[in-house]
Image (spheres, helix red, strand yellow):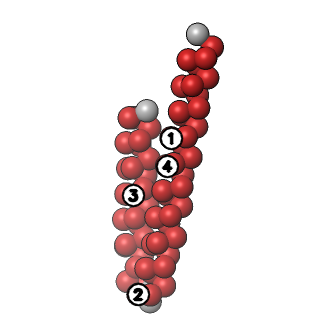
Amino acid sequence: LQVEELALQSMIRAGEEAAAAAAPAEEPHGTLGQMDNEAAINQTELQLSLQDHEEEEEEEESDS
């Protein structure tokens, strides 16, 4: 679980860095909105992956 979290966090950081690098070419307000959207998407992906992992653990526990 911790490995998955770290991998997701590094992907999120890489996405944020890429967005920050592209930011100067865009207007500031649009960039902030885009970054907010990306952050929300990344947060949702993290929550879903954690939820899936917890469900898998519960299934494994109920199988044993």
- Residue for badge 3: 14
Pick whichever of labels 1 and 3 is earlier in the sequence: 3
User: Do tag 2 and tag 4 residues touch (Cβ < 8 Å)?
Assistant: no
Between the C-alphas of marks 1 and 3, the distance is 20 Å
Q: CA distance from mark 4 to mark 3?
A: 14 Å
Q: Earlier in the sequence, mark 3 or mark 2?
A: 3
Q: Amino acid at mark 1?
A: Leu
The tag earlier along the polypeptide, 2 or 4, is 2
- Please, what is the three-letter code of the amino acid marked with disc 4? Leu
Task: Residue 50: give its label.
Answer: 1
Instruction: Establish if 5 lies above or below 27.
Output: above
According to the picture, the residue beneath numbered tag 4 turns out to be 46
Asked whether the residues under the numbered discs 3 and 2 touch, taking CB atoms below 8 Å apart as contact, a structural biologist would say no
**In the image, what residue occupies the spot 45% across and 72% down?**
35
The residue carrying mark 2 is: 28
Q: Is residue 11 left or right of residue 58?
A: left
Q: Residues within 10 Å of mark 2 (few under 14, many from 20)?
A: few
How many other residues sit within 10 Å of disc 3, few (<14), some (14-19) or many (≥20)? Answer: few
Return the x and y of residue 45 as percentages of the image width and height: 54, 52
Whole-percent x, y for residue 44 in the image: 54, 55
Q: Is residue 2 left or right of residue 37?
A: left
Asked if disc 4 and disc 1 are in contact, CB closer than 8 Å, the reply is yes
